[in-house]
Image (cartoon, rainbow, N blue to C red):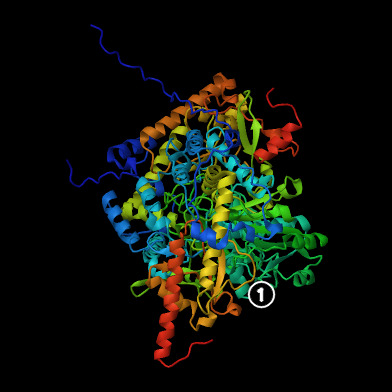
Amino acid sequence: MVYMQKINRDHKVRNYHQAKWDEPIIFELHKIGERGVTLPATEEEITNNVGDGVSAIPLEMLRKTKPNLPEISQNRVLRHYLRLSQETLGAAFNVEIGQGTCTMKYSPKINEAFASSPKMSELHPLQDESTVQGMLEVMYKLDLCMREISGMDYFTFQPGSGTQSLFTMASIVRAYHEANGEGEQRDEIITTIFSHPSQAATAAVKGYKIITLYPDKDGFPDIEKLKAAVSERTAGFVVANPEDTGIYNPRIKEFTKIVHDAGGICNYDQANANGLLGITRAKEAGFDMCFFNLHKTFSTPHACGGPATGALGVVDKLMEFMPGPLVEKQGEKYILNDRLKHSIGKVRSFQGVPQTVLRAYAWIRALGAEGLKDVARVAVLNNNYLYHKILNIHGADAPYIKGKRLEQVRYSWEKLTKDTGVTTEDISHRMADFAHHYWSSHHPFVVPEPFTLEPTESLSKADLDEYIASLTHIANEAYTNPEIVQNAPHNSTIHRVDEQDYFENPEKWCITWRSYLKKTNKTETINS
Amino acid sequence: MNNQKKAAHPYIPNTVPEVQEEMLREIGAKTIDELFDGIPEELHYKKDMNIPKALSEYELSRYIEGILNKNINTKEYLNFLGAGCWNHYVPAVCDEVNQRAEFLTAYAGDPYEDHGRYQALFEYQSLMAELVDMDVVNVPTFDWAQAAATSIRMASRITGRKEVLLPKTISPDRLKIIKNYCSPQIECVFIDYEEDSGQINLNDLEDKLSSNTAAVYFENPSYLGFIETKGQKISKLAKSFEAITIVGVDPSSLGVLAPPSHYGADIVCGDLQPLGMHMNYGGGQSGFIATHDDLTFIQEYPSRLFGIAPTVVKGEYGFGDVLYDRTSFALREKGKESVGTQTALWGITAGVYLSLLGPTGMYELGKSIMQKSQYAMGQLGNIPNVVASRFESTNFKEFVVDFSHTGKSVKEVNQYLLDNGIFGGKDLSEEFPELGQCSLFCITEIHSKEDIDRLVRTIQECIDSISSKEERDGVHAKN
């Protein structure tokens, strides 16, 4: 008798290949006369009444030729985009650890059902308040949860991202000092190099001079430099804690006191607060404002980069500067209050992205107070396990003080690169061969050959072990067969793109298909 | 089995106690609490957060659906609100694509993980470029207001000037965002409109243009729904002062209306929401910016711009970031404004929408909106004392209805409509007090003749009932 033999599954890294559909650019699918969808016909009575409608348009405003869009049947459009979706490694598909700072956690499917309910999706933002009581209730109740989590007094969900939250903070800082007659005088905002680039960038948009603190030998923002930086010109201070290093700055209260003593406002970037839920709060650390990215800590999907929400909280004295309207409860009714005395106005149309607010609220209610604390505890446990394992990989290190980290770590391949010539960029490409996303870090690379990992609470020990096995495998390859890493990816949809020339040279860059057609008519066929 | 043992949470695999113990052993820690030792004792939050206990998935479903059921949506009531967020048909394929877990949960992968995301966004840029007839379109920003504000800042950097001229008819909400985004460096100066037509007053524009003018910004159709016909003259005037012309546009009009690049716009911006996004209580907004393929303009974009390129393998399309070193990702405060998460998924969706409609669909969309809105204006204008439209211009999709002579306020009309299952137009009486009791109505391809007739009938009833009440009370209606 021949029995079924056990199938050998001993390989340590995933035997993976990404989908490769070799799909044309959508314009190449054009077939004259095809249609993807038809629209409701105009009734004959209307046509009899007003004619073709288009004749009413003044001649100089009439479009003379139809837009040069492709004509494609519905099935083919769908197939095209489904294929492109398969060539995209969403967080739902992989052991998502590699996008440190961004808290790529599980986005529960039930929350998608809520977000796509017509009771949510088919609401117009200007409907009478009496007809959107459910929506306002969700916004109000999420505000209450956020107050518990942060200690702040009021929240707005208008900002569409962390960057827009940072911009809103800078706007409030300016409005506050202007209201106190110090708008001109206070023209500096202090931030740190390990913070998100938008902290500095948005404050600069708001007209501020930026002072950037670098880390001290332990990896904390240098407190002596802060003391030297503050003055009567200090408008505000904006910082994350922990920063991208994952090390909590234990002197944070001293930092906020130094800034307050100089008359500045303290802003807490909690875009990622995943290690802190129920553990420690913005208020007790002395902050005047903080924000959470609902698409990070609060699980809403990242959506290829938005739509998203920054939940921005402020202490009482800053309430009147917030963007309006705010949702309030009056008796049993929820209302929109747009009468804020010194409001900066608005930062995003209507009420921001309410479907994201709904998802985040549902997520909180699925966890409860205890579950939220478990999120932080397990995110930190997972991170320390990963940290411990990665320090054992030949060529990897994590700069700054040893000891425990919170939810993420900025690592370095400095030794590996010196030993082998393989860079963090190469490793990023090679990780794709094993179905992993891996991101280096924000620029500038203060830590040499950096990578920033954040495992969140969503991953199991087995998931973490898989990621560690892939990193270990690649580090070994770097020492034994560096070419395989340097020529990666091998199992992705595409191979290495020629980046230098095609994206920097005005004669060669093509930001649209029509531009490509124009520019390639002048030159040889690519890859001929 | 130990009854005291806490159940693992479905979203958190490592809440299994045995696994936690194993991991702690590996790390060399005794408890999870120990991992938080870096946080000073005085900063540890000792209380329990006042947040209700966890709900199971079913309980959550019932609870959230219960709350959502308190809403009345635009499928239940007939909707004539627009004013920056518009009720269009969303083809099923748009939803299918943007609900795919691959796109929904992707974020910042490079082209070796997210080739599909790059291609879909490159295609969106390309499709939108055809609609506006320009060569460069960005990865979307937050909304129309942000796109306009960034366009203004781009113009200011290009010209080195600090003043922008805007029409007085601009949406007050949009203006709040633009003003906050442009301050403190750029001053907003307003151009008067012609009282009868609503169109920009060219004499006033000429008076206000100067060597300080970075840009002239106007909209087509305007916030109040009329088509601004003097685009060519406006852009010529702007050019004569070496100022940049920025036009904000509703893309659903561009199947029938000339794209702004045809009348001299240097930068075109607007909102993608009409192109396949549900209204989502305002969460469907998404801004676009377009320019010519001109280095002076391209290097001022803060946004990501995806370009196409060959790979090392013959016949493969590859993608990447064009002029990445402009951005704040590369240069922090020295980059152009800032970049980050915005509304990429809506960009992909708008691409799907444009692929589905094609040139004929976009034409038919525009035509249908023109026909239906003209019909609605005509019928509303037939109601005694109702003026529709308030402005003597051609309208697209939205138009101003003047109730001033009915003796009743827009608020009262809207309440009557609401009581009869209709969301009436946007009340303009606070935003534009000079117009009196005016309301902004929106008609799109989704409105049937019967929908419009019902609106007209109900408004007629409202005015009749009001008049008869006033007669009963011995008060004569005005006019």
Q: Nearer the viewer, residue B223 or A54?
A: A54
Residue drawn at (57%, 64%) of the image: A259
* Quarter of the view holding residue B370: bottom right
Tell me if B299 is positioned left or right of A466 in this view.
right
Residue B241: horizontal and vertical position, in percent?
82, 62
Residue A138: % across, % down:
38, 61
In this rendering, would B446 be left or right of B295? left
The relative height of residue A296 versus residue A475 in the rendered view (above or below) is below
Q: Position of residue A104 (x, y in %)?
A: 45, 43
Q: Quadrant of residue B180?
A: bottom right
Which image quarter: residue A510?
top right
Find numbered disc 1 in the image and state the secondary structure of the residue it sits on.
loop
Circle 1 chain: B
Q: In this view, which residue lies farthest toward the bottom?
A: B474
Name the quadrant of the N terminus of chain A: top left
Q: Is residue A409 above or below residue B342?
A: above
Asked whether residue A238 appears in the rendered view, the answer is no
Name the foreground residue: B2 vs A120: A120
Is A373 placed left or right of B83 in the picture?
left
Relative to A89, is B70 on the left or the right?
left
Which residue is under mark 1?
Answer: B196
| Amino acid type for the residue under numbered disc 1 | Asp
